[in-house]
Image: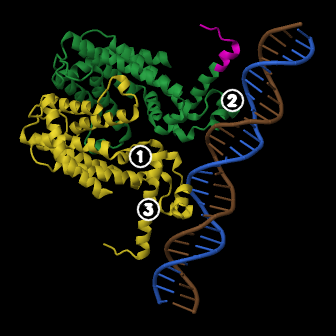
Chain colours: A yellow, B green, C blue, D brown
Amino acid sequence: MVELSRKQREIQERTREILRVAKPILLAEGFQALTMDRVASLMEYAKGTIYGHFSNKEEIVLALALEAMRLRQKLFQKAASGTGLARRRIMAIGLASEFYTQRCTEEFQVEQWMRHSNIWDKSSPDRQTLIRNCEAGCMQIVSELVREGQAVGDLPTLERMSPEEMVFGLWAITFGSQILTASSPSLTALCIIDPIRSTRIHCCQLLNGFGWQPIHSVEEYLGMVDELSAEFHPQFEQIQREYR
Amino acid sequence: MVELSRKQREIQERTREILRVAKPILLAEGFQALTMDRVASLMEYAKGTIYGHFSNKEEIVLALALEAMRLRQKLFQKAASGTGLARRRIMAIGLASEFYTQRCTEEFQVEQWMRHSNIWDKSSPDRQTLIRNCEAGCMQIVSELVREGQAVGDLPTLERMSPEEMVFGLWAITFGSQILTASSPSLTALCIIDPIRSTRIHCCQLLNGFGWQPIHSVEEYLGMVDELSAEFHPQFEQIQREYR
DNA sequence: GTCAATTATTGACGCCTCGTCAGATTTTAC
DNA sequence: GTAAAATCTGACGAGGCGTCAATAATTGAC
């Protein structure tokens, strides 16, 4: 490790400060309200100085997103490190994801901004890679559990279907639900009263469909999720606090 | 119906012309490349004239998106109007959705632009409503099939779970898969070789999980999808041609 | 066919943001 | 103490947005 000079530390600290200033603007007023001039004047630095840290505002968003995704990854890790069968631990990951969307609203929102092609495409490949790696890390946590389920014999393997491809399904269902919930303000108008409960049920039914033992009835499953929730929520909250 | 004067027809035609000009720019170069000045100069009209049709560029995107969604709706209608059991017809809708993503790439892409909060939020409530209605229409087509499955007794009903909430699951899984496929250029790096096949399987397993009769093994299901595909593709292509 | 009223079109304009870079200022190293 | 290196500054050019006063075209009554 290289020792950093005082100046270097100052600069690093300022990078963090920029993110601290930019985040509430992005969240409260959207991307177009996040201007370099504004960040600069709020921080009482010249614009050029800000550009020394981030070569455009898209980079700021991706930097925020990376932080957010690291939090997500930590939650997943915690969930996966629980006890019991792989299926139970996968349920815990579902809960982690739910927690992230529900309780780490800001981070979840930042992730959404990052996905905008406008923003993604204008930021540097380096930062993109960092984010991709983090995403792959999250995925790996889950696919390990699938592998474990298969190894133990609880989950039948399928011809030409990798553990990652199974995760893809769970990922798609939770991700899809979250996006739809976040972007359709009128789900209730479409008779979708409780999207979170629905998503839980769909995950259960998907796992049942794959024959992942033990098979749970919906009632049973929802009960277990509540128990798991009581167990993990304090831990998730702890991680969230540390992150702040 | 009101007769339109020649002038009115001309104006209407120009609206269409604007969309024709704007679409390739949006698709090939993205939203920030779509400027009113550029559209105006390409059409050899003054900018103000374009603003007479669309009060900002976001409106243009939403207008394009509405066209796209109407195509999607037509595909869904065709799929739902097939013969056989509700489960089979739901599979056909899955295929319609696949066809839309795969073969109506441009329309699918336009839909993605519409979902950007930047764009959505800046366009008029009227146009937003049109789009929401179209989305609701698509959803209704599917939820009718769920109702039919339940009525016939093929699909067990669940406590506190509306047909729409069941559709939500299928919607989330296909939508989520499509977004992930479209936005993660390196799915193969994550060991997801064939996302389309995976998605098909996940839909099958979800339906199996819900106990929708007849239950299909994955092999069986994939075979049926191929058959259905042969049956519906020509019809879908027909609809696509009419739309152009 | 004329002409006034209505409707449509134009494009220069003001405002805003982006990202740059030459010059001013501060820090570092000796 | 001082010269070289690093850092910071903010005015500037480029370019997009949306407006609106001025201009042109169209309509329809006579």
Q: Are marks 1 and 2 on the same chain?
A: no
Foreground disc of the pair 3, 1: 3
Residue denoted by label 2? B49
- Give the residue type at disc 1: Met
Q: Which region shows up in magenta? A: B1-11
Does dot 1 land on a helix, a strand or a loop? helix
In the image, residue A186 lies at what x, y percent? 40, 28
* Subunit of label 2: B
Secondary structure found at label 3:
helix
Front disc: 2 or 3: 3
Q: Which mark is residue A17?
A: 3
Disc 1 to disc 2: CB gap under 8 Å: no
Does the magenta portion include B5?
A: yes
- Residue that label 1 marks: A114
Residue in the foreground of this view, choosing between A59 and A166:
A59
The answer to whether marks 3 and 1 sit on the same chain is yes
Q: Please give the chain letter of the residue carrying mark 3.
A: A
Answer with mark 3 or mark 1, whichever residue precedes in sequence: 3
Question: Label for residue A234?
Answer: none
Left-right relation of B161 to A36: left
Q: Is residue A239 above or below residue B142?
A: below
Q: Is residue A27 left or right of residue A81?
A: right
Residue type highlighted by circle 2: Thr
Query: How crowded is the residue under tag 2: few (<14 C-alpha within 10 Å), some, or many (20+)?
Result: few
Picture coordinates of residue B236 (x, y %)?
A: 39, 17
Residue A185, x across and y down, in percent: 40, 31
Q: State the residue at coordinates (17%, 33%).
A: A222
The three-letter code of the residue at mark 3 reads Glu
How much space separates mark 1 and mark 2, taking CA atoms? 35 Å
